[in-house]
Image (cartoon, grey):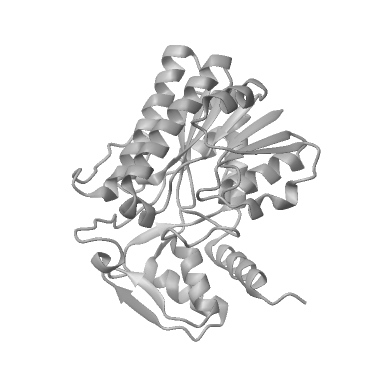
Amino acid sequence: MKALITGGAGFIGSHLAEALLARGDDVTVVDNLSTGQFDNIRGLVGNPRFHFAIETITNETVMDRLVSECDIIYHLAAAVGVELIVTNPVHVIETNIKGSEAVLRIGARYRKKVVLASTSEIYGKSDRVPFREDADRLLGPTTRSRWSYACSKAMDEFLALAYAKQCDLPVVIVRLFNTVGPRQTGRYGMVVPRFVRQAVRNEPLTVYGDGQQTRCFCHVSDVVRAILALADEPAAEGDVFNVGSTEEVTIEALARRTIALAGSSSSIVRVPYEEAYEVGFEDMRRRVPDTTKIRRLVGWEPHIDLDGILASVIASVRDATSPAP
């Protein structure tokens, strides 16, 4: 297979590229490096089955050539992270909607399968936990920029499913729930890398809000396995699948486990949402996936528990910050 990964220099994309190469596929990465980093794929350069283009996915000329030469598109390019959503909403909305529209339109031109990465943000403020793929969504008002990301990714899903219905485009949508692991930066508000860096430095861990909001974290290697299994399963086409762990933890408990596993002397400091993001910021209290659908179709379930996830991130952060010999 010849795979094209949009956003392939990013956190998840670079791990996906490694997995595809390991199983013998040819891989081309396209990334404008706005949030991805070339260091994430530096080790792949020189592999004769690996190619990359530093370019935006809205460049029609470049994307037309890349799509025409591939067998499948893994569309991971997106503007992500709560901090980025709040501080640069125009960029988030335009990047996600225009980028996905370009990928789907060109994919349909050559009828190439598209695996589209979506998000648990889709479910918004709904309290009907665990979230099923066909559940109703509950979002805040348009005056809260917090919800612009959820709406932009919902439009990506609507458009992908429309192409599947109207143009017979093979499409698979994966809704990712808090993917974490080595190479993830805390630059745009991602909680696990932020906690780990603070703990390794023995700095206070900043918990936003009251810390009782809960999340489920899934290791990137488990997420990549899910993406590949769904991409290879014809019965997944034209459908949406949750991908994530069901091991629920409060953010305060996550902070304490991070401190313990890192052997850190850090304390915990609570920061109001209005200080961390903006006045009137809204968050969801629980975010737990129902993974029955993917489990029944391809037999997938996560292998790495939360302590294993934190241990791997702690080790990678220490490796990255240790002085060179």
* Residue 242 sits above or below residue 312 on the image: above
254 horizontally vs 27: left or right: left
Residue at 46% over, 61% down: 187
Pick whichever, 239 or 81, lies toward us. 81
Q: Nearer the viewer, residue 195 or 263?
A: 195
The residue lying at 77 percent from left, 36 percent from top is: 49
In the rendered view, tell whether residue 243 sits above or below residue 185.
Answer: above
Position of residue 309 measured from the top left corner of the image (x, y, whole percent): 57, 62
Asked if one can make out residue 61 in the rendered structure from this viewpoint, the answer is yes
Kindly indicate the quadrant of the structure image that contains residue 229.
top right
Residue placed most toward the observer, 196 or 320: 320
Q: Nearer the viewer, residue 322 or 175?
A: 322
Residue 238, position as x, y percentages in the image: 47, 23
Where is residue 222 drawn, in percent x and y? 59, 49
Q: How many marks?
A: 0
Q: Is residue 80 left or right of residue 136?
A: right
Task: Please say whether residue 127 is visible from this viewpoint.
Answer: no
Q: Is residue 310 above or below residue 263?
A: above
Quadrant in which the N terminus is drawn: top right
Q: Pick out the residue farthest to the bottom.
A: 265
Image quarter of residue 320: bottom right
Quadrant of the snapshot with the C terminus: bottom right
Residue 248, how many percent across, how many down? 42, 59
